[in-house]
Image (cartoon, rainbow, N blue to C red):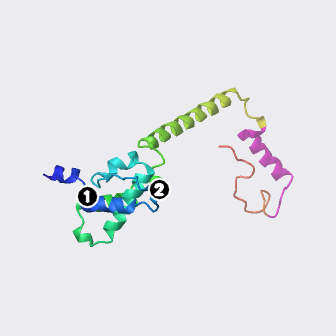
Amino acid sequence: MQAIRLARPRVSLRRLATAAQAPTSASSSTTTVSVIPLSNVEAQWEKMTKSEQAVVHRQLEELQKKDWKTLSLDEKKAAYYVAFGPHGPRAPVSPPGQGFKVFLSTMGLVGAAGLLTLAIRSQAPPPPKTLTREWEEATNERALAQNINPIHGISSEGYSGKGFVTSK
C-alpha cells in the first residue's frame, strides 16, 4: 500500500505543476507539463532537466507555505534534498576513495625523492678535510695560541664552550 501511495502523484501536486507552468500568452497554450512525483527525488534529480527541476522546486515552495505538520515524509525529504542536497555547488569535488589515492601517490613521490637523494649522495665526493674533527681541534689550538677574541671568545678567561669544533 505504501509503494502504491508513493508511486502515484497527488492531485494537488498536479494542479500545482500546471499552475506553475501555466502559459502566459495565447501562443503557448498547447504546452502541457507532466507532474513529477516527489517520492525519491534524490534518485531522480540528476536525471531531470533544468525545467523539471524548476517545476519540482516551485512545487516544494508551494508545499512549504503550508503547515509542516501536514506534509508527508516524502515531501519533507524532497524539500530538504532540493535545499541542501549534494547537487550543484554542493556536489562533491572528488569521488569517494580519492583521498586514499592522493595519500598513496604522495607517499610514492616522497619515497622516490628519498631514493633520488640517496643516489645523489652515493655519487658525491668525500667531505673536505677542513670538516674533520682533527682539523677543528687544531683550529682551536691555533686560536688559543694567537689569543683570538680574548673578551668573549675561546681565549677569554673561564671559557667553557666547544670553540670551533662542530662535527660530531
SS for tag 1? helix
3D distance between C-alphas at marks 2 and 1: 36 Å
> What residue is pinned by disc 1?
74
- Which residue was labeled with disc 2? 27
* Left or right for 57, reference 150: left
| Amino acid type of the residue that numbered disc 1 sits on in the rendered structure | Asp
> How many residues crowd around disc 1 within 10 Å: few (fewer than 14), some, or many (20 or more)?
some
Amino acid type of the residue tagged 2 in the rendering:
Ser
Q: Name the residue: 23% across, 70% down.
A: 69
- Residue range highlighted in magenta: 130-151
Task: Say which residue appears at 79% left-offset and 46% top-offset.
Answer: 139
- Residue 166 lies, in percent from the top left, at 70, 47
Residue 111, relative to residue 84: is it above or below? above
How many numbered callouts? Answer: 2
Dominant SS of magenta comes to helix
* Left or right side of 104 for 44: left
Q: Is residue 132 magenta?
A: yes
Q: Nearer the viewer, residue 79 or 160?
A: 79
Classify mark 2: residues with Cα within 10 Å, few (<14), some (14-19) or many (20+): few
Quadrant housing the C terminus: top right
Is tag 2's residue or tag 1's residue first in the polypeptide sequence? 2
Q: Is residue 49 magenta?
A: no
